[in-house]
Image (tube, grey):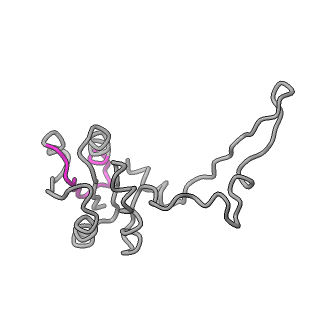
Amino acid sequence: MKILLIGSGGREHALAWSIADSPLTQQLVIAPGNPGMAPYGELVDIAADDIDAICDYAAKMPADLVVVGPEVPLVLGLVDKLNERNIPAFGPTARPPSWKGPRNLPGRFANAITYRNQPFIQWIITPPPASILMHLAVV
């Protein structure tokens, strides 16, 4: 897999180390990265908050997966823009969850139960899509 990792901090350094260690990784490109990440992949000089440049580079690679580490590009909608271009991305979208939508998510995931005669809510988290699980297996 050709993977584009966004970020330059400690979290992204750990991700770069893990991704580079996977036998499924054919190429790892890190934008912008830092000198300590150079042993794990190719560093490219694209700012983590330059959404359009990241999308263009991911399309040009072409990236099989874009992993977004820092919060700023997530908030700026990087994953949304990548999805619009049909480029797989790991990270949440900028759009907040629709808690009061027709799906009534809290109602679907919460069960009222009793513990020591006190009711409380048990949250049941559904598993992520199979494609995300496959990419997590890479890391």
Residue at x-position 15% and y-position 57%: 44
Q: Position of residue 126 (x, y in %)?
A: 63, 52
Q: How many marks?
A: 0
Q: Is residue 15 left or right of residue 100?
A: left
Q: Nearer the viewer, residue 23 or 93?
A: 93
As drawn, which residue projects farthest toward the bottom? Answer: 85
Residue 85 is one of the magenta-drawn residues: no
Q: Percent position (x, y) of residue 41?
A: 19, 50
Q: Quadrant of the N terminus?
A: bottom left
Q: Position of residue 92 (x, y in %)?
A: 46, 56
Res 35 → quadrant: top left
**Between 59 and 97, the one nearer to me in the picture:** 97
**Residue for point 45% across, 60% down:** 93
Question: Which contiguous range is marked in magenta?
Answer: 19-34
Residue 125: where, in percent of width, then height?
63, 48
Indicate whether residue 22 is drawn in magenta: yes
Instruction: Please tell me whether residue 29 is drawn above or below residue 19 in the rendered image.
Output: below
Q: Residue at x 39, y 74 (%)?
A: 86
Left-right relation of 1 to 127: left
Looking at the image, the residue that sits furthest to the right is 117
Query: Which image quadrant is residue 64 in?
Result: bottom left
Residue 111 placement: quadrant: top right
Q: Which of 76/18 is in front? A: 76
